[in-house]
Image: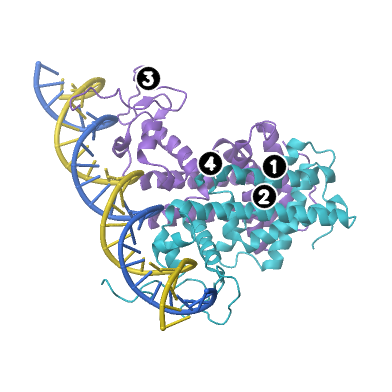
Chain colours: A cyan, B purple, C blue, D yellow
Amino acid sequence: MHGSPPGSTAAAPSTGAPAGPPASTDRDGSRAGRRTGGGTRREQILREASRLFADHGFHGVGVDEIGAAVGISGPALYRHFAGKDAMLAELLVGISVRLRDGGERRVEEAAAAGRSPAEALDALITGHIDFALDDRALITLHDRELDRLPERDRKDVRRLQRQYVELWVEVVCRVYPDLSERCARGAVHAVFGLLNSTPHLSARTGALPDRAGTADLLHRMARAALASAAGVRDGAPGGG
Amino acid sequence: MHGSPPGSTAAAPSTGAPAGPPASTDRDGSRAGRRTGGGTRREQILREASRLFADHGFHGVGVDEIGAAVGISGPALYRHFAGKDAMLAELLVGISVRLRDGGERRVEEAAAAGRSPAEALDALITGHIDFALDDRALITLHDRELDRLPERDRKDVRRLQRQYVELWVEVVCRVYPDLSERCARGAVHAVFGLLNSTPHLSARTGALPDRAGTADLLHRMARAALASAAGVRDGAPGGG
DNA sequence: AGTCGGCGTTAATGGGCGTTAACCTGGGAT
DNA sequence: ATCCCAGGTTAACGCCCATTAACGCCGACT
């Protein structure tokens, strides 16, 4: 019991890539960047933690569960994170940064290429849809577990979220000049709700055709919803 | 310590109506229906519990907190409910029943009055918006805490939710015959996401004009989103 | 008047869980 | 060859919290 060999009792990881035999092939120079199946240990942990948090809620997941999901057990997580809170914080801040930076990049690129505000808005919609479809768990956490964060991080996340919303509002107001900023903000929030509904869809079996079809459907709905918020018939063409 | 008089140490209720002096004025005949400030004790508890669950998540709220919110302390809740799970179950089942029954009633009334499918759809939208605006906490719980339910109740709630969705899908398919049922289901889910976004809005101060304005905005957006899902320009009038 | 049950109270119990402690190991740098 | 430390392991601690136990008050019926 006491001197038993380690590494045999831990549960198997739930991702597709089993980490049983340590991946000895891919050694990169960096010290803290040892890689197993899918990225750094830290990244593995964050990925699994996000899935678990999204499924069962932050308080509904134990550290042992998270550990088991990556093939290590319980307290070993403390070699990578200061605690459970720190994992959630890193996830939420990471999401918010990615959303904001991605949005800013798209708007800047559109402006640099001399495209119309409507095209910039399309770029924002496309980016958000990609995110919602590819990182469903993160999207779920994004607007669900914010309150479980220690004060400091919560403020950071809120600031980032606000910046992202304002980015949208600016573009929307440029596309629909008659729309008040107040209404635009409300409409943008509603469109986020629409786009972020994807987690619910894919829970059901085959609820939607495929990725491209879903993306197209959501894109059309989002654009039409915004247009109608401005009291305008949507005159844009069909899809991307 | 042991024989101290009860009723003096409990925390004050957070609702507007203090329950300090027992309401002796309103006695109705029913035995289990004693009333204090706002409805039955059971109803008080459910109301506060829904608010707390929505704010902090099911696992993030303790029974002592719920008790304190209605002016009693901790284990007294067990005089009214079998346990914490039972409260959540009653809330979620109640929501789902109200949504489904309300929806069915509206559709039947529209049919009985000889109205068009489009008008039935408008009635559904209006009903959902009323619900989302008046019971924000419940709407939040509705799609967030389902997994925290014991198996039996979870199945019930899912069945009710499915029936509600199917009700919408039927009406939508009648309004837009070219829309495949599959796409209609996806679009309906997306519209739910749009309409249920209201909790996020009102968290911010003055994010939206007023109740009527918000309802109108959401209604227009929902209708336009559904129309665009069918590949149709929304031809309905402004709304009201 | 007497009693009985609804509704509270506080104290105790028991399990779950985050976190820490103490210890082990294997592979790269010296 | 040796050392070191990143990254594991299991055991233990302590808190939080849902639930139960044991008891008290009061209003309503007989």
Question: What residue do we see at 67% from left, 59% from top?
Answer: A131
Q: Position of residue A20 (x, y in %)?
A: 45, 78
Q: Which mark is residue B106?
A: none
Do residues under tags 1 and 2 come within 8 Å of each other at their CB atoms?
no
Do residues under tags 3 and 4 come within 8 Å of each other at their CB atoms?
no
Q: Which mark is residue B26?
A: 3
Chain ID at mark 4: A
Image-quadrant location for residue B66: top left
Three-letter code for the amino acid on which mark 4 is drawn: Glu
Same subunit, labels 4 and 1: the answer reads no
Residue that numbered label 1 is attached to: B219
Three-letter code for the amino acid on which mark 2 is drawn: Phe
Question: What residue do we see at 70% from left, 45% from top?
Answer: A163
Q: Nearer the viewer, residue B142 or B182?
A: B142
Determine the CA span between mark 2 and mark 3.
46 Å
Chain ID at mark 3: B
Q: Position of residue B169 (x, y in %)?
A: 62, 56
Chain ID at mark 2: A
Same subunit, labels 3 and 1: the answer reads yes
Image-quadrant location for residue A90: bottom right
Q: Earlier in the sequence, mark 2 or mark 4?
A: 4
Three-letter code for the amino acid on which mark 1 is drawn: His
Q: Secondary structure at mark 1?
A: helix
Determine the CA span between mark 1 and mark 2.
16 Å
Relative to residue B63, is residue B130 drawn left or right? right
Do residues under tags 2 and 3 come within 8 Å of each other at their CB atoms?
no
Residue that numbered label 2 is attached to: A192
Q: Position of residue B172 (x, y in %)?
A: 67, 54
Q: Is residue A22 above or below residue B112?
A: below
